[in-house]
Image (cartoon, rainbow, N blue to C red):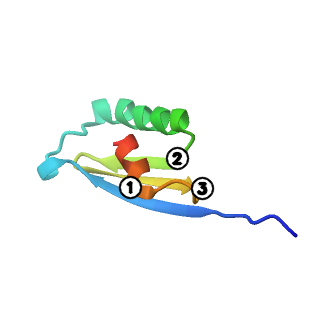
Amino acid sequence: MGHIYYKIWIHTVWSIKERNPLLTKEIRFKFFNHIFEKARESGYHLEMINGVADHCHALLSLNPKYAISEVLNILK
């Protein structure tokens, strides 16, 4: 019997509360690095994160054993 291979890609969009433009260029890099570090520490594969002042996009590849809602709560 062969191995089963899963590849689940999740595209998320996080909006800043009330769409306030809080992710200024000065803090965006630190914010994105913080999210990357949390993903790495938790064992998740965060392929890409980017955004503008009022929202960000993230692309995750998840193992099916992880619940999407739990992963996003940890990263946020």
Mark 2, secondary structure of its residue: strand
Which secondary structure, mark 1?
Answer: helix
Number of the front mark, 2 or 3: 3
Q: Position of residue 60 (x, y in %)?
A: 51, 53
x 44%, y 57%: residue: 68
Q: Earlier in the sequence, mark 1 or mark 2?
A: 2
Q: CA distance from mark 1 to mark 3?
A: 13 Å
Quadrant showing the N terminus = bottom right
Against 9, is 50 above or below?
A: above
Please, what secondary structure does the residue beneath circle 3 have? loop
Distance Cα–Cα, label 2 vs label 3: 12 Å
In this rendering, would 15 be left or right of 76?
left
Q: Check residue 69 in the rendering and tell me which mark sits there, or answer none.
A: 1
Q: Which mark is residue 46?
A: 2
Could you tell which of marks 1 and 3 lies nearer the N-terminus? 3
Residue at which label 3 appears = 63
Which of the two residues, 27 or 66, is positioned nearer the viewer here? 66
